[in-house]
């Protein structure tokens, strides 16, 4: 039986990474390790729809990216 996580905010943030800009510096992984992970030297995995209470982590990741590849949007704005 599939499970759902009802604790997540119903209106998650929208997060995207421009993988053409990303240079795998991994600063986002240090800034928000629960949401960004680098596998090997090139494969970046990230949560594209974290709950709104992850905003501080996602903003820290966005600001830490040296090539400004991370975009964080609030779907309500
Ligand atoms: S900090 Fe920026 S450049 Fe580095 S892995 Fe994350 S998104 Fe890519």
Image: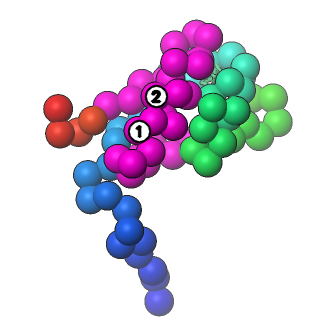
How many marks are shown on the rendered structure?
A: 2
The residue depicted at 72 percent of the width and 20 percent of the height is 25
The stretch in magenta equals 46-73
Name the image quarter holding residue 23. Answer: top right
Task: Residue lying at the far left in this picture: please name it.
Answer: 77
Quarter of image, ligand 1 = top right
Left or right of 71 in this view: 69: right
The stretch drawn in magenta includes residue 66: yes
Within the image, what quadrant is residue 45 found in?
A: top right
At horizontal 53% and vertical 27% (from top left) the residue drawn is: 60
Residue 22 in percent (x, y) is at 62, 19
Mark 1: which secondary structure?
Answer: helix
Q: Where does the C terminus fall, quadrant-wise?
A: top left
- Cα–Cα gap, marks 1 and 2: 6 Å
The reply to whether the C-beta atoms of the residues labelled 1 and 2 are less than 8 Å apart is yes
| Residue 60 on the magenta segment | yes
Q: Is residue 39 above or below residue 5?
A: above
Choose between 35 and 60: the one closer to the eye.
60
Q: Please, is residue 63 above or below residue 47 in the view?
A: above
Where residue 58 appears, as percent x and y from the top left, is: 48, 34
Q: Which residue shows up at 68% across the image and 24% down it?
A: 27
Q: Which residue in the structure is indicated by mark 2?
A: 59
- Residue 41 vs 21, above or below: the answer is below
**Residue, disc 1:** 55
């Amino acid at each position: 039986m599939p499970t759902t996580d009802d604790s997540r905010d119903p209106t998650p943030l929208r997060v995207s990474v421009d993988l053409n800009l990303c240079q795998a510096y991994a600063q986002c992984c240090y800034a928000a390790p629960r949401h960004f992970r680098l596998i090997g030297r090139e494969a970046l995995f990230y949560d594209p729809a974290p709950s709104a209470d992850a905003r501080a982590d996602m903003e820290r990741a966005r600001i830490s990216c040296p090539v400004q590849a991370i975009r964080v949007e609030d779907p309500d704005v």
